[in-house]
Image (cartoon, helix red, strand yellow):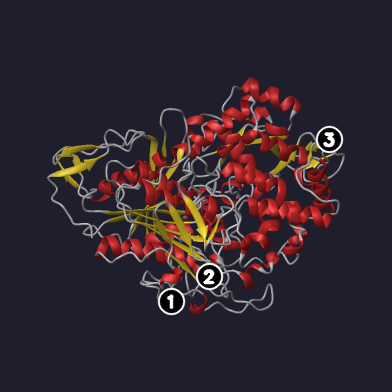
């Protein structure tokens, strides 16, 4: 439990948190000032909880599950319309929005903080404050602080919600955002420098802090303006027409290296706006009444946002954060050779690989492995056309990367390569859809980010642009371009912007349909895939820069004694447990002087809950359960520990039961499918770290 303290000392943000998360302790009576990293104006908007609100943008539980919101003028959407679109799309991207999947019964806006299903639409009144954070480099990290009308000044709390993936600032609203608002907590969002920022290079158009498209005027005001001069941009377009640059890929700042700082700054910004609202006014000044000492702060989110929360906790040497609760975190580390990870009695094949290492392996082998015997019933297999996958297998064989003379032999060996690289067998059926929908977009984005490449580099022959006609990318349709802030996810392909193979035989083509120069075949661009892999394994200048960028993102596992919980799905195909949560937990136990992290590994759960209810991915629904259910439990566990001193349950495997039934029409989920994290799990289910060995029950 976090005890309140007197206001004899209050934590103010005059100095900013800087690189080490430091702050200045000032005596009561010193006026609060704007944190030094806040750039430009702070925009405040009040929401009545009826026509519009913090959580659902006025759509309510029913509207979030319904058709996409429309625009009065699709070519000229308002900031309010773009916000509504962004919240709608981000919400649906992170959870299964179907009733049979648990929406409205196990989770959702109408399910209250105690887990009780209500008849409410879940709209939450309050106010929202938006500003940029900038370290002086022009980074324009977007921060949002939501203060619900139910915020309790007597028992203040703040929940962080760093964006998932490369999403915009509302990219964790369905997870950490919803949980915090239901509890009456302020929610501190950040796009962590990877948000949905795009620069239409041909039109020289960018997007404002609130998503409105405009011709470039001042980079200080845009969500993202690609670095470089106008002469460099026009020179590039002369031979590369109708291209786009993206914030995560092309900022040339390696945003992941500062995710921890960005999250701490969002917390500090939250304290500032809370005290502007609730502080004590005296003689024209406002004095802080909401402080680190009397406020519960939980760092939270999922995926990349979860990695940002862990990074912030590691960096936090000033006590901003009290606890951590994350799901499926993307976190990287240098795993010592002295640590062994076992599943049951068997050492895992590989553990602790950096994200770029295992993604470039996936990018090479997944389309071929999708046609292995074990993957025959993969959901969405049609998204990886057999003819092109056969050509990829043949190209791998010709380069000596797989063995076998037939498709069957080559694809089976490709799957074996994925097992050897650390994927668990539970991922086998999901490689096809992950390759088709995620693998290359993430790989290419991080290749650019880690190497700090410019859009002008056309790294490995790739670029971003509209669908080519006769070898030339087309401009994006006016409505699609205008609405991009609301519909985009930050990593092409998205909203009509594609990944292009500049080197395709016959002219620029969408990568998936391109023809590789080295093979003369449509094989998912084997030349680009091997080039991306060489950026990790090679010795060239760009490879050296890529590895240096990766090293700048690695974490230590030291959480400074904070109570923490990680939940992760064993079937995670995007961020495999062997390269993220398992080794991070082991490193924490080995390195932290006061280890308080618990790790819960959930069977039959994976990275994209949004896939479970997708009619085009039939079979996800019958085989998998929502990890979101356990994210909410993780939040409850950390909250109850901080608030009431309730013990955190031991690390364990949580054994779930899939819904089964007919793919695409699985029966409704029940609580029996997703049993709670056990307070006292049997020894056979406990995850044990002992003398350098982490043992995860089979």
Say which of 46 and 266 sits in front. Answer: 266
Tell me if mark 1 has few (under 14), some (14-19) or many (20+) residues whose alpha carbon lies within 10 angstroms of its own: some
Q: Quadrant of residue 243?
A: top right
For residue 678, above or below residue 358: below
How packed mark 3 is, by other alpha carbons closer than 10 Å (few <14, some 14-19, many 20 or more), is some
Query: Distance of mark 2 from mark 3, alpha carbons?
Result: 50 Å
Residue at x 47% of width, y 33% of height: 139
Q: Are marks 1 and 2 in contact (CB under 8 Å)?
A: no
User: Along the line of sight, which residue is nearer the eye, 468 or 72?
Assistant: 468
User: Which type of secondary structure does the marked residue at label 3 adopt?
Assistant: loop
Q: Nearer the viewer, mark 2 or mark 3?
A: 3
Residue that badge 2 annotates? 62
Residue sitting at x 59%, y 76%:
659
**Disc 1 to disc 3: CB gap under 8 Å:** no
Figure quadrant of residue 66: bottom right
Q: Is 534 above or below relative to 409?
A: above
Q: Earlier in the sequence, mark 1 or mark 3?
A: 1
Total number of numbered discs in the rendering: 3
Left or right: residue 515 compared with residue 603? right
Q: Which of the 4 image quadrants contains residue 29?
A: top left
- Is disc 2 placed on a helix, strand or loop? helix
Can residue 200 be seen here?
Answer: no
Dot 2 crowding, Cα within 10 Å, few <14, some 14–19, many 20+: some
Q: Determine which residue is flagged by label 3.
A: 517
- Mark closer to the chain start, 1 or 2: 2
Report how far apart the C-alphas of labels 1 and 3 lie in the structure: 57 Å
Of the two numbered discs 1 and 2 in the rendering, the one whose residue sits closer to the viewer: 1
Q: Is residue 243 left or right of residue 330?
A: right
The residue mark sitting in front, 1 or 3, is: 3
Residue 170, x across and y down, in percent = 48, 51
In the picture of the structure, the residue carrying the numbered disc 1 is: 117
> Residue 457: image x %, image y %?
66, 28
């Amino acid at each position: 439990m976090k005890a309140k303290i007197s206001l004899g000392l209050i934590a103010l943000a005059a100095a900013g948190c800087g690189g080490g998360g430091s702050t200045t302790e000032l005596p009561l009576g010193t006026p609060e000032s704007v944190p030094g990293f806040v750039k430009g104006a702070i925009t405040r908007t009040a929401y009545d909880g009826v026509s519009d609100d913090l959580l659902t943008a006025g759509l309510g539980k029913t509207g979030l599950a319904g058709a996409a919101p429309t625009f009065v003028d699709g070519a000229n959407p308002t900031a309010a319309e773009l916000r509504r679109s962004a919240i709608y799309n981000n919400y649906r991207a992170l959870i299964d929005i179907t009733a049979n999947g648990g929406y409205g019964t196990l989770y959702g806006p109408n399910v209250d903080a105690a887990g009780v299903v209500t008849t409410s639409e879940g709209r939450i009144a309050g106010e929202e404050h938006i500003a940029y954070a900038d370290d002086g480099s022009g980074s324009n990290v977007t921060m949002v602080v939501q203060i619900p009308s139910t915020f309790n000044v007597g028992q203040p709390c703040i929940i962080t919600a760093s964006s998932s993936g490369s999403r915009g600032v509302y990219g964790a609203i369905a997870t950490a955002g919803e949980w915090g608002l239901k509890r009456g907590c302020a929610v501190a969002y950040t796009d962590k420098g990877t948000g949905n920022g795009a620069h239409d290079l041909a039109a020289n158009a960018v997007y404002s802090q609130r998503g409105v498209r405009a011709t470039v005027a001042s980079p200080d005001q845009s969500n993202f303006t690609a670095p470089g001069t106008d002469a460099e941009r026009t020179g590039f377009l002369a031979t590369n027409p109708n291209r786009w640059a993206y914030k995560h890929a092309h900022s040339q700042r390696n945003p992941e290296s500062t995710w921890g700082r960005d999250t701490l700054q969002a917390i500090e910004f939250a304290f500032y706006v809370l005290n502007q609202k609730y502080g004590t006014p005296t003689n024209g000044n406002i004095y802080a009444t909401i402080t680190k000492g009397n406020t519960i702060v939980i760092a939270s989110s999922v995926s990349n946002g979860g990695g940002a929360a862990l990074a912030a906790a590691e960096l936090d040497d000033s006590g901003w954060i009290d606890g951590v609760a994350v799901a499926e975190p993307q976190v990287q580390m240098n795993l010592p050779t002295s640590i062994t990870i076992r599943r049951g009695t068997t050492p895992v094949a590989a553990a602790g690989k950096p994200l770029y290492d295992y993604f470039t392996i996936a990018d090479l082998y997944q389309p071929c492995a999708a046609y292995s015997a074990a993957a025959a019933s993969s959901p969405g297999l049609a998204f990886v056309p057999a003819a092109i996958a056969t050509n990829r297998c043949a190209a791998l064989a010709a380069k000596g990367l797989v063995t076998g003379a037939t498709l069957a032999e080559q694809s089976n060996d490709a799957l074996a390569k994925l097992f050897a690289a650390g994927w668990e067998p539970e991922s086998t059926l999901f490689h096809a859809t992950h390759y088709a929908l995620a693998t290359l977009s993430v790989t290419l984005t991080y290749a650019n980010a880690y190497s700090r490449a410019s859009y002008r580099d056309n790294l490995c022959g790739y670029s971003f642009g509209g669908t080519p006609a006769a070898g030339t990318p087309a401009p994006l349709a006016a409505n699609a371009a205008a609405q991009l802030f609301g519909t985009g996810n930050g990593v092409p392909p998205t909203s009509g912007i594609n990944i292009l193979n500049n080197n395709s035989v016959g002219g620029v083509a969408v990568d998936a349909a391109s023809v590789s120069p080295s093979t003369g075949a449509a094989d998912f661009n084997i030349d680009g895939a091997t080039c991306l892999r060489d950026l990790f394994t090679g010795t060239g200048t760009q490879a050296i820069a890529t590895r240096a960028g990766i090293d700048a993102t690695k974490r230590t596992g030291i959480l400074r004694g904070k109570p923490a919980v990680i939940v992760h799905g064993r079937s995670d195909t995007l961020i495999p447990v062997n390269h993220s949560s398992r080794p991070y937990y082991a490193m924490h136990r080995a390195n932290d002087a006061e280890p308080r992290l618990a790790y819960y590994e959930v069977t039959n759960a994976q990275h994209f809950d949004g896939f479970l209810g997708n009619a085009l991915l039939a079979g996800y629904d019958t085989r998998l359960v929502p990890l979101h259910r356990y994210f909410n439990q993780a939040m409850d566990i950390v909250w109850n520990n901080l608030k009431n001193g309730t013990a955190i349950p031991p690390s364990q495997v949580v054994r779930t039961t899939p819904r089964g039934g007919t793919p695409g029409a699985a029966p409704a989920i029940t609580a029996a499918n997703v049993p709670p994290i056990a307070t006292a799990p049997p020894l056979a289910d406990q995850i044990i770290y002992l003398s350098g060995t982490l043992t995860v029950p089979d």
